[in-house]
Image (cartoon, helix red, strand yellow):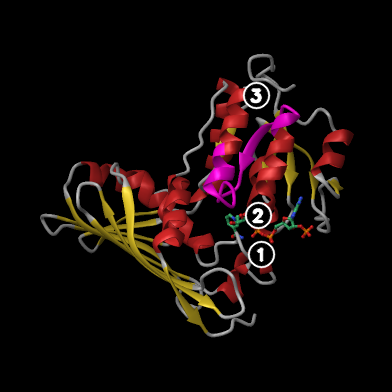
Amino acid sequence: MTNSSSRNNSKPLSIGLVGLGKIAIDQHIPAINANPHLELVAGCSPHARPEGVRAYKSMTEMLQAHPEIEAVAICTPPQVRHAIAKEAIDAGKHVFLEKPPAATLGEAEAIRRLAEARGISLLASWHSRFAPAVEATRDWIAQRSLRSVQIVWKENVRQWHPGQTWIFAPGGMGVFDPGINSLSILTRILSDTVFVQKADLHIPVNCDAPIQVGMDMMTDTGVSVRADYDFLQENEQTWSIFVESTKAEKLALHMGGTRLEIDGKLVLQEKETEYPGLYAHFAELVRNGKSDADFSPLRIVADAFLVGKRIVAPEYIE
Ligand code: NAP
């Protein structure tokens, strides 16, 4: 078993990637390769065979061939994540979960319990929390009382998720797949608990998950939070959060958290470096024998499905 208490922290953490799709190729492989404390040993995916990665058909095969792997990063669609995480934890591997941590809250909690029982490190990652302007937004909010928060998260599914049929299948979450990123920022910048009051879930007649969502939320101190998610956005893509204080001061977090404006003035704009930050965090968790598994963004999505009204939307054809 790989255990932080027994591992030699001077050698790089050896990692196996599970699921070699878009996010693994765009972000995980470069972030691991750029971090001297990490080593990418191998990957697995039923079909994908990206260049430069020793790839196996399944995690079982990968772990058999490479018992030296100490940690796995699970970058599959959410529907299969629980079974894979369970197998990895049973094998004593530390686990980095892509967002969302699982298809259901129950699965996510089961993974957390298994990790605790086995004494391995678990990271339920929320990459958007590592966007450069998120902590400055949190600090700004901490010094004020708020009137309202508004989330506008609108992107073109055909542009960003071509061929990803799992997104509209049960457990794929539809437009909440990107929308949960905004909720991961929301639950980081607000210290209050957020409740869903009302949600309109527009579900294409041929799909099982929403393509557009309008959602009203409230914090336990009475701040209203509105979220609008749209997967059919053409032209300009929008990933913004607007915050207004009770003194009418206005903060705007744009481009998924890379650009911050206060009262209309630009105060921060930086390149996105989310995955290097996430992997540095994961390496530190393993080094210190700790876990980070906050499921509050997933709870909000689950609550939206609990109280949401289903509205039939036109057929979606990619
Ligand atoms: P994707 O391009 O569809 O890739 C998913 C990969 O998982 C596919 O290559 C697929 O295999 C593989 N897979 C499916 N079942 C598997 C299994 N049982 N064992 C091993 N591999 C399996 O999706 P993605 O965009 O990378 O998204 C994956 C996750 O990352 C999602 O939860 C998503 O929310 C999250 N994420 C995505 C983005 C993004 O911009 N795309 C950003 C942040 C987070 P084959 O192709 O080999 O059949």
Q: Nearer the viewer, residue 228 or 138?
A: 228
Residue 247 x/y as whole percent: 10, 55
Q: Residue at x 55, y 66 (%)?
A: 174
Q: Amino acid at mark 3?
A: Arg
Sequence-earlier tag: 1 or 3: 3
Q: Which residue is mark 3?
A: 118
Q: Is residue 103 magenta?
A: yes
Extent of the magenta region? 89-109
Q: Is residue 199 above or below residue 281?
A: below
Element type at mark 1: helix
- Distance from disc 1 to disc 2, alpha carbons, whole Å, reads 8 Å
125 on left or right of 78: left
The residue identified by callout 2 is 79
Rendered residue at 72%/43% (across/down): 84
Check disc 1 and give the amino acid type. Answer: Trp
The numbered dot on residue 166 is 1
Mark 3 element type: helix
Please identify the quarter of the rendering in which residue 318 is found.
bottom right
Instruction: Report if the beta carbon of the residue with label 1 is closer than 8 angstroms to ligand 1.
Output: yes
Q: Residue at (51%, 48%) from the top-left corner?
A: 127
Number of other residues with Cα within 10 Å of mark 3, as a class: few under 14, some 14 to 19, many 20 or more? some
Mark drawn on residue 254: none
Work out how far the residue at label 1 is from the one at label 3, CA to CA, in angstroms: 31 Å
Say whether residue 199 is visible.
Answer: yes
Compared across the picture, whether 276 is left or right of 235 comes to right
Q: Residue at x 89, y 35 (%)?
A: 65
